[in-house]
Image (cartoon, grey):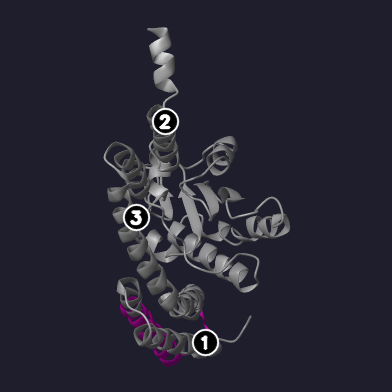
Amino acid sequence: MTRRLGSLLTTPFALMVLVCLAIVGWSAWTGGFFDDAVERHVRTSSFYAAPGVEVDREAAERIIGDRKLVVIMLEPNSDSDELRERCSGDWNAAANTLMLVLSQGEDEYDQYTCSHLPGAYEENFGKSYVAETVIASGIDQFADRPLDALKVVVVNYDLLVGSDTLPDGVREFDAPVGRYVVAGATVVAVVIGTTVAYLGARRVGRVAARRAADREAAGDARSRLSAASASLAQQIIELDRLYESVRRSLRRSEKERRAFERKYRAIVSEYTRLGQSVVRFDGEGQDANWLTGRVEELSERCRRLAATVPAR
């Protein structure tokens, strides 16, 4: 019996089965089969908030957009060791991203940042250090407003991309279903034959090539729209502060205050409508350029209105 089993394991068919089992195990590990709840979530989303965190999760995802950035908000007052443990480690689910783990405190955020970008702690160690230091700058003043804190994080991220500290481009989500398909196709190729695997690989390759071409064609227009939207969000935050200042100012007449308030409300209303258009945007080319033009036009209106308030 032992001799038969040994001879069976040395046959080409048995060796191919062992290779297939190894591929299946690798696919399960890299595809998310052993992921916890947080890892499974960030495979298809750039924002995760623990159940005890009060934040509009959909709005947070829209703010981050398709950047190579992952933000995780743990329960308020989480231990610093928990933040570090969650951020570091082997993150197949968030590969090629900059990860920021936050926990709301009474007056500030506890935060821990780590880079999962290629060569982060080797040839790109200096850039990673700068990115991890800068990405959360200025968020403590919005300790009770997590969405505004996220807007600041996004602005910091775009500045890092603009200074060539972080790589430009959009995040590519790696859904685990694709790896299971690859593993299943390998087993079918051994058991049934190589023909099915060959035809399936050709079909997947054509779809992947077409999608890659579409992403490349729309990449430049989307990047410009994303940068303009992030800059406009920061201007709206600044106008909020100026609006409160003007309302309380005793040096301005009632007519001046009403004029400022009317222009401010018109800008905010236009920003809300425009933000919905940007979020729903799924086109490219001229449509992206048209939306970018509207965003830049509204940014100019924000600058003109802000200029009417003298600096203190």
Is the C-beta separation of discs 2 and 3 under 8 Å?
A: no
Q: Secondary structure at mark 2?
A: helix
Say which amino acid is labelled 1. Arg
Among numbered discs 2 and 3, the one appearing first in the sequence = 2
Magenta span includes 135: no
Q: Which residues are magenta?
A: 249-273
The reply to whether residue 213 is visible in this rendering is yes
- Residue that mark 1 sits on: 303
**Is residue 217 rendered to the left or right of residue 109?**
left
Vertical placement of residue 42 versus 304, above or below: above
Which is nearer the eye, 246 or 113?
Answer: 113
In the image, which is nearer the foreground, mark 2 or mark 3? 2
- Residue that mark 2 sits on: 12
Q: Secondary structure at mark 3?
A: helix
Residue at (55%, 89%) from the top-left corner? 307
Count residues near mark 3 (Cα–Cα under 10 Å), then give few for <14, some for 14-19, many for 20+. some
Q: Secondary structure at mark 1?
A: helix
User: How far is disc 2 from disc 3 in space, using C-alphas?
Assistant: 23 Å
Is the C-beta separation of discs 2 and 1 under 8 Å?
A: no
Q: Quadrant of residue 32?
A: top left
In the image, which is nearer the foreground, mark 2 or mark 1? 2
Say which amino acid is labelled 3. Ala
Among numbered discs 2 and 1, the one appearing first in the sequence = 2
User: How far is disc 3 from disc 1 in space, using C-alphas?
Assistant: 53 Å
SS assignment for the magenta stretch, majority: helix
- Residue that mark 3 sits on: 201
**Is residue 273 rendered to the left or right of residue 261?**
left
Question: Where is residue 173 drawn, in percent x and y?
Answer: 41, 56
Among numbered discs 3 and 1, the one appearing first in the sequence = 3
Vertical placement of residue 135 versus 177, above or below: below
Magenta span includes 271: yes
Vertical placement of residue 183 versus 165, above or below: above
